[in-house]
Structure formats: C-alpha cells, structure tokens
Image (tube, rainbow, N blue to C red):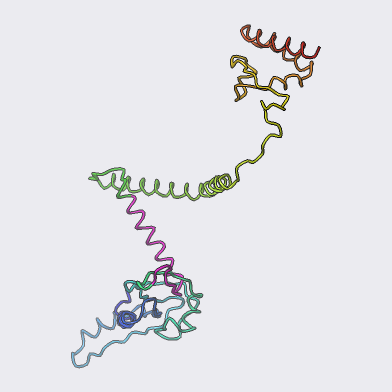
Amino acid sequence: SYGKWIGPALKAAKARVDSAERGSWELVAAINVSPGCRKPTSAQKKSVKHLQTTYEPTMTTASCAGYIVFCDKLTVKLYTNDLAGAPFQGVLRGDSSEAISLWHGLVSLRRWTGEQVMHRKIFQVPAVIVAHNLFIKGFDRVNQLRSTNPLRRKEKRLSMSALTWSSDLALINAYALFQEIAETRAVQRTRLEKDRRRQPPSSNTPNEVVGFNDSPHALSPIPRRIHLESLSATCARCAGSLRKLSTAVWDSMFRYAQHLTPYVLQRPVMQLYKHAGENKQ
C-alpha cells in the first residue's frame, strides 16, 4: 500500500543492482506512513488552486522490516520483517557490515555462472534468499507432480476442482513424508549390501582331500528319499564319518523313525542303524 512512497527507492536500487555483478544485493528500508495521509489531499482540492500545496506525509523507518534487491539470473525483490533492527539509512549496500548484521549473517549460495567447469561459484547472501529459492523449487515441483498425475483431468465444477486439488496435495505431501521417514532404512540397507560386496571370498580349504588316496574317507551315494539327508544340500556324504556318531544318536534316530516318520521312511533309517551297529562291532 506504500508503493507510492517506497517505489522510487526500489526502482533506483534495482537499476544499480542490474548493472552490478551477479550475487550483488542491497537493503532498502521499509517506511511507515501516517494513517491520515490521504485526507489533506482531499481537503486541498476544495481550496483555491493557487493556494494548494503538495502534501508530504509523515514517514518513519519501519522497525525490523525492509526489502532486499538481489541480482541472480534475474533481479528479484523480497520483503521481510525479520531484520535484527531498524536500518539507520534508507539504502544499504550488501558489503556493508550494518546490512550483514541486520540480516543475522550470511549463507552460502551456489550458482553456475558460465565460468566454472567442475564446481559452482559460491555467493554469500542473506538466508531469506536461500529459503526463497528452496521453497520456490518446492512449489514448482508440486505443480509439476500435480499436472502430471491429476486425480481429475476434466475439471468443470469449482467444488470438484477444489476437492481434487486438495487430494493431490495430500498425496504428494504424504509420499514426501514417507520418503523422509524411509530414507534412513534405505541408507542402512545400501550400506549392508556394500559391506557384503566388499567382503573377500572365503579361502578356507579342508585339510584333507576327500576321496584322495591317503584320506580315510570315501564318498558314497545316499538316496535323496531319506528325510534326514533331504535336509542337506549335498548328494553324497562320507561313509567314514558315519562311524563317528555314537550309539545313543542312532537310538534316538531309530525311535524318531518309528513314532514320527511315515512307514516309507522307516526302512532306510533302520538300514542306517543296522549299518552303524555292524561297524561298531
């Protein structure tokens, strides 16, 4: 509403920033105009023309409020009421210590200016500019997602348009929150997979080669229909290792075969039990 009074200062600041290098900015102090600034103008119209004078309202510098004119790819103007205090001057350059202290310090902003190859150039700007760029990107992304996957393509009624618009925003925000919550788990899973890939292959080899001339072990085929052997991944087992099992183990296997296993599987287990008894004798 005070564009008539602050407009000339903003236009002059914009002209200076346009001619400056990229990353330059200026702070223009906001003003407060007296509430009755229009009443004297209407009263002067009733008086004689040669007695009319230009009315100058009472203007004061606003506290903790101002405009920033920033030169990015295009010159932008932003308003804020979060300054640390009231500026002592109407316009402050960005490299002045007073302007930096009023903006609570500066934040790094990275931009491609056409001269860099590997890394972007870093500018020191107020935090409101970085926040503006971040949230504007969010608005653009939401508009892109909503236009790509809308709930209703042919929107005719205003009530239906408002409903589908709110539904689209709810779904987009819910998916964004889900990605933020599930991001930690995804990182953990990725680290586990990387750790597994980095592990060297196992180099443990048996001391004795099974089936060699000097080895006391020999491989013998065992039918896959035996329930105890079907749990194993190998199709053959060392017959010599069967002698290492105690009689108590074979007794428990025999009772298991009688009471719990089907009749078809009892015969192979009993043969193993008999074979173990002969080897023991």
Q: Is residue 12 above or below residue 179?
A: below
Q: Is residue 14 above or below residue 238?
A: below
The quarter in which the N terminus is drawn is bottom left
Q: Position of residue 51 (x, y in %)?
A: 22, 92
Q: Using the image as rendered, state which of residue 139 and residue 40 is in the foreground.
A: 139
Q: Residue furthest front?
A: 213
Q: Using the image as rendered, state which of residue 95 and residue 281 is in the foreground.
A: 281
Residue lying at 33% horizontally and 54% vertically, measured from the top left: 143
The quarter in which the C terminus is drawn is top right
Residue lying at 68% horizontally and 22% vertically, measured from the top left: 218
Residue lying at 31% horizontally and 45% vertically, measured from the top left: 150
For the image, the number of numbered tags is: 0
The quadrant in which residue 222 appears is top right
Q: Using the image as rendered, state which of residue 55 and residue 1 is in the foreground.
A: 1
Query: Would residue 62 be seen by someone viewing this image from the given angle?
Result: yes
Q: Residue furthest left?
A: 49
Tell me if 21 is positioned left or right of 226 in this view: left
- Magenta segment includes 162: no
Tell me if 14 is positioned left or right of 235 in this view: left
Point out the stretch of residues depicted in magenta: 116-145
- Magenta segment includes 129: yes
Residue lying at 44% horizontally and 50% vertically, measured from the top left: 176
Q: Position of residue 204 (x, y in %)?
A: 66, 39
Tell me if 14 is positioned left or right of 209 in this view: left
Query: Would residue 6 be seen by someone viewing this image from the given angle?
Result: no
Magenta stretch: dominant secondary structure: helix
Q: Position of residue 52 (x, y in %)?
A: 22, 90
The quadrant in which residue 137 appears is bottom left
Q: Is residue 60 above or below residue 189?
A: below
Q: Position of residue 162 (x, y in %)?
A: 31, 48
